[in-house]
């Protein structure tokens, strides 16, 4: 009775093959859609891309001379400030939760649950938070409703947005540092702080860095919170101070794509290409760092 | 549509959450030399370099004109720092009433409630028309049966309690094909103007139509759907002539197709409308704001035309310029009803 395979087995094998094909096509669909989207974008966007596109201000009539300088500079401002706010606070919070609060108290449990939840909150909600807190704050400080909606307001809002991401990634990286590292250091007489600074953080740094870079990537592409806290659609100047008006790359794209003229739509496509290239570059840096650190361990 | 929904939420949210914050905008970062006496306004010498700052917000319909003006103005006055935004007419008016902006773009005249808010906050405004627009009725190019439409038919289709489901329901001569309606969302000034013209009530329209916050979505929808009908600003038709069919509108004197001439002359009625800018009177004391508005009303400006809108006739521009220089406050356009001629409206100020 070992010869002929039972019809049951044949059916099971058929189902098995079928499932493989289904799973394969599911994977292919995602990639194919992405490729179609990218090829369309590049076809629309590449013709207008040039050095001039990156170094000119937006234009309303002469599409050939239009550019995204103000958007790029605005995005860089927001990114740098966001980095300065979010990284120390995020890493600090994670170190506290992971290294100093080894006993699970109700308080840290509460913080932890909150951070986990916050990382899933839609970005628009952070925009509302920024509008409720930072806009009135800076309006009061500068006595000018315009300056209340300047770069620093946007950057602080973005910092809130990526803070949970940075905390969670940092915690994961800290967790992955072997216990023996800490014990070795402590047994040599190092204090907790010395152990963290000299042993744990360096060992965890590739993971932390990767997380930070990915979080910055997210912040570069976000539009919603910045519209709410008042990034402009058009500025004729480059920001010079923390409370100046600004615009960012995704908002420039949003602005152009809602116009009637096809010329604007092409400009939007070009700006999208720039944004995608920037995001891919950011993510590649993260991947490279991660790959290197794996190599070392 | 995700984007569209978000925009609506964002604006609504902005309206709800920004409560306080009223400080004197005029006091910040301006050159502050104002030599204004009422009567003949102090127009700065053309080659005098101005500094200071200027903020514009409001209607997304007027926004392209504003940006083009900003660009032209920037060529002569590169040192004036200008910020422009497009939160929508209603949201722009709110910011204007809170002294957050100098100039509010509007695709409809200011409302009584908004005038009240301005009065309470002590904001005197000068109201200026900058361009014409003609709301254009568009259908799919495959639509062979509709060669003109009357206001009564539009009303039958768009009325609040309308039961029209197929083209045949409107006119028995038309085919029994489902009618698919496209329009802007209800926060648009365009929506309010259309309803006032067609349904005699700003808020009164059926709601079971495809509501688009982005006009390009509307254009794309009408372009692919054979039984569709929608209304858009003239500029959007002009830029999408191949995917849309324009329907002449019969306002009582036979069908008229919107065009530069018929909109400017007022022959295309009642769907022609003025596009407006509201400027704070205090802001006009700043030479850069005055100079910008003078440029907006300058005959030589190409801003309106380049963005697909209809330029005002010279005599209207002159009337508006007088109004600006005299800093005449108050609204005459709140009396504007669809179908009125603009020079008649502007002359009303004398009686006010």
Image: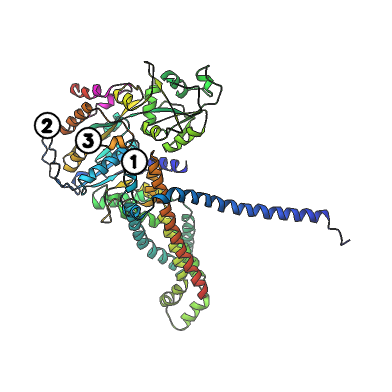
Circle 1 packing at 10 Å, graded few (<14), some (14-19), many (20+), is many
Q: From the viewer's side, name the closer residue of A106 and A31.
A: A31
Indicate which disc, 3 or 2, sits on the residue closer to the N terminus.
2
Residue at x 72% of width, y 55% of height: A16
Task: Residue B339: say if magenta.
Answer: yes
Mark nearer the N terminus (1 vs 2)? 2
Q: Quadrant of residue B120?
A: top left
Mark 1 lies on residue: B86
Label 3 residue SS: loop
Query: Do the numbered discs 1 and 2 sit on residues whose CB atoms are within 8 Å?
Result: no
Which badge, 1 or 3, comes first in the chain's sequence? 1
For the view shown, which residue lies furthest in the right direction?
A: A1
In this orientation, which residue lies closer to the viewer: B233 or A92? B233
Indicate which disc residue B39 carries. 2
What residue sits right under mark 3 in the picture?
B300
Between the residue at mark 1 and the residue at mark 3, the CA separation in whole angstroms equals: 25 Å
Q: Is residue B99 above or below residue A226?
A: above
Tell me where the magenta segment starts and ends, as one range.
B329-345
- Residue A63, image x, y percentages: 34, 45
């Amino acid at each position: 009775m070992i010869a002929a395979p039972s019809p049951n087995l044949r059916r099971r094998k058929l189902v098995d093959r079928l499932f493989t094909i289904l799973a394969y096509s599911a994977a292919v669909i995602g990639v194919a859609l992405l490729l179609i989207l990218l090829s369309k974008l590049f076809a629309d966007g590449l013709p207008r891309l040039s050095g001039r596109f990156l170094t000119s201000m937006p234009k309303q009539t002469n599409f050939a001379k239009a550019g995204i300088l103000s958007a790029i500079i605005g995005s860089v401002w927001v990114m740098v400030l966001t980095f300065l706010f979010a990284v120390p606070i995020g890493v600090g919070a994670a170190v506290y939760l992971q290294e100093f609060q080894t006993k699970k108290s109700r308080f840290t449990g509460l913080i932890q649950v909150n951070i986990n939840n916050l990382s899933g909150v839609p970005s628009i909600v952070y925009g509302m938070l920024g509008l409720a807190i930072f806009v009135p704050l800076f309006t009061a400080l500068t006595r000018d409703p315009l300056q209340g909606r300047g770069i620093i307001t946007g950057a602080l809002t973005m910092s809130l947005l990526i803070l949970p991401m940075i905390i969670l990634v940092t915690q994961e990286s800290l967790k992955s540092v072997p216990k023996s590292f800490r014990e070795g250091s402590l047994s040599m007489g190092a204090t907790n702080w010395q152990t963290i600074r000299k042993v744990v953080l360096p060992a965890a740094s590739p993971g932390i860095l990767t997380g930070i870079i990915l979080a910055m990537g997210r912040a570069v592409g976000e539009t919603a919170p910045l519209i709410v806290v008042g990034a402009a659609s058009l500025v004729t100047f480059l920001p010079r101070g923390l409370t100046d008006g600004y615009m960012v790359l995704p908002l420039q794209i949003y602005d152009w794509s809602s116009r009637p003229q096809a010329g604007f739509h092409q400009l939007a496509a070009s700006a999208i290409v720039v944004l995608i290239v920037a995001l891919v570059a950011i993510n590649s840096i993260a991947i490279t760092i991660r790959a290197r650190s794996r190599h070392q361990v | 549509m995700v984007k569209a929904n978000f925009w609506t939420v964002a604006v609504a949210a902005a309206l709800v959450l920004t409560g306080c914050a009223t400080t004197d905008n005029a006091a910040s970062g301006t050159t502050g030399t104002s030599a204004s006496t009422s009567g003949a306004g102090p127009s700065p010498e053309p080659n005098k370099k101005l500094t200071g700052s200027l903020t514009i917000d409001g209607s997304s319909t007027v926004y392209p004109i504003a940006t083009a003006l900003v660009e032209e103005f920037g060529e002569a006055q590169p040192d004036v720092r200008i910020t422009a935004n497009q939160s929508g007419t209603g949201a722009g008016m709110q910011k204007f009433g809170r002294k957050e902006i100098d100039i509010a773009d509007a695709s409809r005249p200011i409302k009584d409630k908004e005038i009240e808010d301005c009065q309470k906050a002590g904001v005197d405004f000068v109201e200026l028309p900058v361009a014409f627009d003609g709301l254009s009725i568009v259908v799919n190019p495959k639509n062979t049966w509709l060669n003109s439409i009357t206001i009564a038919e539009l009303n039958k289709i768009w009325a609040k309690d309308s039961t029209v489901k197929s083209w045949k329901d409107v006119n028995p001569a038309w085919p029994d094909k489902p009618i698919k309606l496209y329009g802007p969302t209800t926060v648009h000034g365009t929506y309010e103007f259309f309803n006032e013209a067609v349904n005699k009530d700003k808020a009164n329209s059926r709601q079971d139509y495809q509501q688009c916050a982005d006009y390009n979505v509307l254009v794309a929808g009408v372009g692919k759907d054979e039984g569709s009908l929608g209304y858009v600003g003239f500029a959007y038709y002009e830029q999408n002539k191949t995917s849309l069919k324009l329907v002449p509108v019969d306002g009582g004197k036979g069908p008229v197709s919107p065009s530069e001439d018929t909109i400017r002359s007022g022959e295309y009625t009642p769907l022609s409308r003025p596009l407006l800018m509201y400027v704070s009177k205090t802001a006009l004391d700043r030479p850069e704001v005055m100079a910008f508005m003078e440029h907006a009303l300058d005959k030589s400006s190409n801003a309106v035309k380049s963005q697909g809108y209809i330029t005002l006739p010279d005599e209207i521009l002159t009337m508006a310029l007088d109004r600006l220089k005299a800093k005449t406050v108050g609204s005459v356009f709140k009396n504007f009803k669809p179908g009125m001629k603009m020079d008649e409206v502007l002359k009303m100020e004398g009686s006010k």
